Image (tube, rainbow, N blue to C red):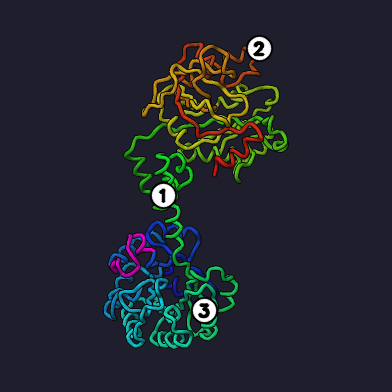
């Protein structure tokens, strides 16, 4: 199968007789994102590359710096890049060398504008910027075309007459001269918020050669109008850098004001996603080879209940499949588990088990869910127990760090306890945790053990230390303890009524040490209708 060159791809876009679109990028990762989004080409924006260097769009970044960045962008992608080449970075001789260097880096084309060097961005006092001499600019185009070795390398001539206030007739005159000089396309530029002068130019140009536009100012123009006018290529010229700046400003303010990452970590791209954009398959293999790996963790998720207080929402599905912000509770939980590398997932279903249709899970069915409680449900997945596993409820929402820290905490059985007893959002019947030591918020993990779980805060004289959130990490000996305890508890007359806190209390009575990992908020379980709004806010 032959590979179509990037130069040929760009020429095809220009000459396709269809309206085509390319999007700005300014470094390797943004170029990769543009390709992943589905675009057929990339605009190597001078404004955006200057901005990512932290300098003005006045040729303050040297052409060699620009070309170096383009090399990273080209290596990261398979689609063509059209460089915003400003004025060609000098005279005809600079233009010749530029074209040679671009071709060496597999850049498909360059757009040059008919202003004088050094240039200033067209939207900054554009009418005060002198235009280049027509003959001199035509010579620059010819020099570039004579220097290319690939016949499909494209040079697009950008006409700045409308920006500089010279009007339609001058714009047409210049465009015709540049076309005659060998330009492969004409970019007609405007700073007007209306497309009138662009559409007028397109009508007069009448398809003499490919016509390119940059509708940054007249962005509200319907795409259908551009297509009807015979435009060949639309450049979305600076929206990736502007998006990045807005997001970085928001994130940096949040981190500065909160002195924490908790409010931003779940709202930004994961490190794993960055690795993916970088093409980090080789890095993953190297990590497997050189870094010690944790044993494979298996998650056991209890999802058999209907959810009595959510009755009207669960007539056709279990509570775990209620949608929060477009994703089910169980889907969000599984997504969070996979983000920390937990991919072996057993879901214990019961009520409306067929509604749990999430891929890449093993589903166990508790057919007798109506007459039994949590321990009877847990026993259904006993064949799936692992020497390194999590046991947790399916209605939990939590920040990613909670799961990561739980896995890192030493202990045969470790439970997560929220020490924020003043949590106003607590609904349902909480599991109050009584611990060997209250949370004093130290900078490092505390050596704390669980002494009791109770549904009542005044069941004993000692005040509770927090709430158990319904999540535990179990290792080899802890698994053995749990399996033995389940066999013992099965003999109890009330076994069908027992829940996970009963199992943990039974283990504590046997002298087993249950370690505590403290947190302070940043989680939610969904028990009642009022929790749905809170859950929606939590997932924003």
Residue at the spot of label 1: 274
In the rendered view, tell whether residue 399 sits above or below residue 484: below
Q: Along the polypeptide, which appears first: circle 3 or circle 2?
A: 3
Q: Along the polypeptide, which appears first: circle 2 or circle 1?
A: 1
Work out how far the residue at label 3 is from the one at label 2, CA to CA, in angstroms.
84 Å
Instruction: Judge from the rendering whether residue 41 lies leftward or rightward of residue 384; answer left or right.
Output: left
Residue 460 is tagged as: none
Q: Nearer the viewer, residue 338 or 359?
A: 338
Q: Position of residue 15 (x, y in %)?
A: 49, 77
Q: Along the polypeptide, which appears first: circle 3 or circle 1?
A: 3
Q: Are marks 3 and 1 in contact (CB under 8 Å)?
A: no
> Badge 2, how many Cα within 10 Å: few under 14, some, many 20+?
few
Tell me the residue at 42%/86% (across/down): 174
Q: Evaluate whether residue 152 shows in this view.
A: no
Work out how far the residue at label 3 is from the one at label 1, CA to CA, in angstroms.
39 Å
Q: Secondary structure at mark 2?
A: loop
Residue 493 is tagged as: 2
In the rendered view, tell whether residue 507 sits above or below residue 25: above
Residue at the spot of label 3: 198
Residue 148 within the magenta-colored segment of the rendering: no
Q: Secondary structure at mark 3?
A: helix
Q: Nearer the viewer, residue 396 or 155?
A: 396
Q: Position of residue 133 (x, y in %)?
A: 34, 86
Q: Nearer the viewer, residue 533 or 292?
A: 533
Quadrant of the rendered image containing residue 525: top right
Stretch of the chain drawn in magenta: 48-62
In the rendered view, tell whether residue 35 sits above or below residue 159: above
Tell me the residue at 67%/26% (across/down): 369
Q: Nearer the viewer, mark 2 or mark 1?
A: 1
């Amino acid at each position: 199968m032959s590979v179509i060159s990037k130069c040929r791809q760009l020429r095809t876009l220009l000459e396709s007789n269809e309206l085509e679109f390319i999007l700005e990028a300014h470094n390797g990762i943004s170029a990769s994102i543009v390709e992943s989004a589905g675009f057929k080409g990339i605009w190597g924006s001078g404004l955006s590359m200057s901005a990512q260097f932290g300098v003005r769009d006045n040729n303050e970044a040297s052409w060699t710096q620009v070309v170096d960045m383009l090399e990273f962008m080209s290596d990261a992608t398979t689609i063509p890049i059209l460089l915003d080449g400003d004025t060609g970075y000098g005279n005809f001789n600079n233009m010749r060398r530029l074209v040679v260097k671009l071709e060496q880096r597999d850049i498909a084309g360059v757009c040059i504008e008919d202003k004088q060097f050094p240039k200033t961005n067209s939207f900054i006092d554009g009418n005060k910027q002198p235009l280049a001499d027509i003959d001199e600019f035509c010579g620059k185009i010819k020099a570039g075309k004579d220097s290319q070795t690939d016949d499909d390398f494209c040079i697009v001539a950008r006409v700045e007459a409308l920006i500089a206030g010279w009007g339609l007739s001058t714009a047409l005159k210049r465009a015709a001269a540049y076309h005659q000089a060998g330009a492969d396309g004409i970019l007609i530029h405007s700073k007007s918020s209306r497309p009138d002068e662009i559409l007028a130019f397109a009508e007069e140009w009448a398809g003499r050669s490919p016509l390119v536009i940059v509708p940054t100012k007249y962005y509200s123009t319907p795409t259908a109008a551009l297509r009807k006018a015979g435009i060949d290529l639309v450049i979305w010229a600076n929206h990736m850098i502007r998006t990045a700046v807005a997001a970085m400003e928001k994130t940096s303010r949040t981190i500065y004001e909160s002195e924490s990452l908790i409010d931003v970590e779940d709202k930004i791209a994961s490190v794993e996603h960055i690795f993916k954009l970088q093409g980090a398959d080789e890095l993953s293999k190297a990590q497997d080879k050189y870094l010690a790996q944790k044993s494979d963790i298996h998650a056991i998720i209890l999802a058999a209940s209907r959810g009595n207080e959510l009755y009207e929402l669960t007539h056709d599905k279990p509570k775990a499949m209620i949608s929060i912000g477009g994703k089910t509770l169980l889907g969000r939980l599984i997504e969070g588990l996979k983000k920390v590398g937990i991919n072996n997932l057993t879901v214990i279903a019961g009520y409306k088990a067929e509604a749990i249709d999430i891929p890449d899970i093993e589903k166990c069915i508790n057919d007798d869910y109506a007459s039994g409680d949590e321990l009877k449900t847990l026993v259904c997945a006993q064949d799936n127990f692992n020497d390194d596993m999590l046991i947790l409820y399916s209605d939990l929402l939590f920040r990613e760090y909670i799961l990561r820290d739980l896995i890192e905490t030493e202990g045969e059985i470790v439970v997560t306890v929220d020490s924020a007893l003043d949590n106003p959002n607590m609904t349902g019947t909480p599991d109050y945790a009584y611990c060997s030591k209250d949370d004093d918020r130290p900078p490092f993990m505390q050596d704390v053990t669980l002494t009791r779980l109770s549904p009542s805060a005044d069941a004993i004289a000692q005040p509770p230390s927090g709430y158990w959130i319904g999540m535990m990490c179990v290792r080899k000996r802890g698994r053995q303890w749990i399996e033995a305890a389940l066999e013992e508890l099965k003999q109890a007359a009330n076994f069908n009524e027992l829940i996970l806190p009963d199992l943990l209390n039974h283990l504590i009575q046997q002298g087993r040490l249950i370690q505590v990992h403290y947190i302070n908020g940043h989680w939610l379980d969904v028990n009642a209708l009022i929790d749905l709004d809170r859950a929606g806010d939590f997932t924003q």
